Image (cartoon, rainbow, N blue to C red):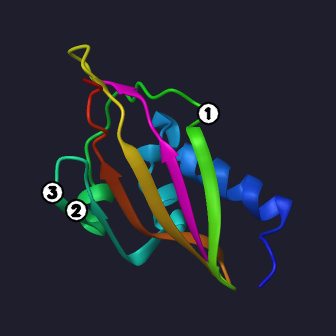
Amino acid sequence: MTELSEADRDLLQRLEESLWRETSRFDRAYLDTVMAADFFEFGRSGNVYARDDVVSMPSGPINAVLPLADFQIRRLDQNLAQVTYNSTVTSSNGTVFRPRRSSIWSRTSDGWRMRFHQGTPIPDPD
């Protein structure tokens, strides 16, 4: 199996980062184009979110650091890729969260679609 093309790698990074930008993250039409019909998420809270939960979230500020840190892409199959990175997000009350993130993207005839996402808290250093 060959590696993903540089164009696919750039596109996947742009798609992943677009979900950390308010203008695209809360745009229902945009989310309908990038999230697969069977999408689901394991949030950093441990909660499970269905696609409808995610695309209907109320808009609000997203204070994420971009570009995403430690961004990596691993090809799983001809049309399947896993994206991993560490995010840094500051909540409205000033709390900083730094979870590890993983997304599964599948290439369809309409482009790349996110099928799964997971956030896992990184323990604070002792």
Question: What secondary structure predominates along the stretch shown in magenta?
Answer: strand
Left or right, 73 with reference to 33: right
**Residue 87 lies in magenta, yes or no?**
yes
Instruction: Compare marks 1 and 2 and give the one earlier in the sequence.
Output: 2
Residue beneath disc 2: 49
Give percent across and percent down for residue 88: 42, 29
| Residue 113 lies in quadrant | bottom right
Circle 1 — which element?
A: loop
Frontmost residue, 6 versus 15: 6
Residue beneath disc 1: 67
For the residue carrying disc 3, how many other residues have a C-alpha within 10 Å: few (<14), some (14-19), or many (20+)? few
Kind of residue at badge 2:
Tyr
Left or right, 87 with reference to 80: left
The alpha-carbon separation of the residues under discs 3 and 2 comes to 6 Å
* Quarter of the image with the N terminus in it: bottom right
What span is in magenta? 80-90
**Residue 22 lies in magenta, yes or no?**
no
Check the image and report above or below for 83 versus 58. Answer: below
Left or right, 47 with reference to 55: left
Frontmost residue, 124 versus 98: 124
Residue beneath disc 3: 47
Circle 2 — which element?
A: strand
Give percent across and percent down for residue 42: 26, 61
| Residue 53 lies in quadrant | bottom left
